[in-house]
Amino acid sequence: MKKNYLLGMALIASLSFYSCDKEVVYVQDGNGVESVADGNQIITLQVENGGDGLVTRAGRPLYSAEAKQSIENVKLWICNDEGSVVFVKEIPDWNSDGSKPYNTNGHGRQTTIELTGEDKLAAGTYKIYAVGYSNDSDYDLKNVTDVAEEGTFSENIKLPVKADKVSTVNGEEIFAGQLGLTVEAKKGFKTPIILNRQVAGAFAYVKDIPYIDGVKYLKLVASAKNKSLVLGNFNSFDLTGNGTGNTGHVNYVVNGADAADDGNFKYEISKVDLTKWFTNIKDDNTDGLIDVDGNWKNGIDNADAGSKETTFQKGSVFGGDFVIPFAKVDSHQSLTLVLTKEDGTELRSWKVKLAADDVNNAYYWDGSVWTNQTSGETVNYYSLVRNHLYGIGTRMTDNPGGGTDPDPDPDPEDPEDKPESLNNKQELVLKVNDNWEVIHGMELE
């Protein structure tokens, strides 16, 4: 028996070997040695970012930059050169029984599918596609769920937000990926298909809230809103590091479609009700800010959130959500933070700027093809792109204190949990994180 010893990452390389004698391929994956027998066809499904099952509606709420997932199903299909589906596999209960953590920085989940018997692929070229989604999704998923074996597959899948959700939903976490595969006669393979997050995220984590008579809400608003998500032009790289280590592999893709066209240019991403964070909206000490001492409370209902471990710094407020990526709108500030009265009257606003070194042109979906944007991005007019997190303030985990204290007030200051002060600020800067390919830290103006 001839043996080939291969060193490398089994999770990021496909293997195919053959000889006239039976051949065993040994793969070193960093955690031990495993063998792949001659002719075996093995696909490893890997979904970036390990999850904890935190769910309020379809998907999960966005409370920080923490790498998580709460998808419940993964569907995989393999297509031949003509686009015909030759194999379909659905995996329910993905985040519990359907997968297990994998050891690339401990941030993902994976499962292995072996093609045997009639399911084995004949020699030829194929494309493998996979989508991870929630059971009660806010997207209309028929373009995913209705794809069956012997059917025809269209590469750029459009997922519209359900008609009754369009007015309230900005986006929902969903994962997808694709892989080209060449199968050679009498040769086996072991290859991964990596699923990355297909939406953006944006949040405002701030403190020192100005007191203005009648103030009720703090809103993060965007210049545009898309009503459909397009699954295509994937990044199939294993994005590790949650902010580092992905040099050369970060993609800038606007995969939203069907823009809202009501001429509003101020679409709410989040709306913080200040009465949920402060017992009374008052300024008894006349410092121009809403009083904190004896007046602040955690505004997130942890019972509703399904977690007892969502904590915030004393005096802060938080609002954020997943966002279907959108292209910039010329002459309209991409993100703005606004204080309003209950009736929506604006009392004060801050322009939210992108740091200059985070400005990048992006690919976008024009309804038929992926193309480069023809006009440049700027610090004020920028696109929100797939798998990037845009944050005002720094918040790296849902539970920065590591405990269940509802009112953390760290001393010294925690550099990974730092709400941005609004006191006397003229602008705010977005921060951008990776793994999440990039987390954008934003500026207020």
Image (tube, rainbow, N blue to C red):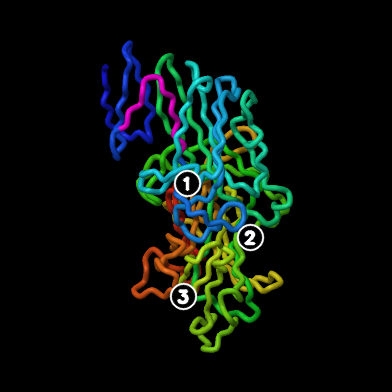
- Residue type indicated by callout 3: Asp
Looking at the image, which residue is at 38% across and 34% down?
Answer: 12
Discs 2/1, front: 2
Is 42 contained in the magenta span?
A: yes
Q: Is residue 184 above or below residue 270?
A: above
Cα separation between marks 3 and 2:
27 Å
Give percent across and percent down for residue 281.
Answer: 60, 81
Q: Which residue is mark 1?
A: 360
Q: Secondary structure at mark 3?
A: loop
| 342 horizontally vs 44: left or right | right
- Residue type indicated by callout 2: Glu
Residue 375 shows in the view: no
| 226 horizontally vs 436: left or right | right
Magenta portion: prevailing SS class = strand
Give neighbour class at mark 2: few <14, some 14-19, many 20+ (Cα, 10 Å): many
Q: Secondary structure at mark 2?
A: strand
Q: Is residue 26 above or below residue 247?
A: above
Q: Secondary structure at mark 1?
A: loop
Looking at the image, which residue is at 46% across and 62% down?
Answer: 398
- Residue type indicated by callout 1: Asn
Cα separation between marks 3 and 1:
38 Å
Q: Which residue is mark 3?
A: 407
Which mark, by number, is residue 268? 2
Give percent across and percent down for residue 47.
Answer: 47, 42
Discs 3/1, front: 3
Give percent across and percent down for residue 126.
Answer: 51, 23
Of the numbered discs 3 and 2, the one sitting upstream in the chain is 2
Is 161 contained in the magenta span?
A: no
Magenta residues, start to end: 34-45
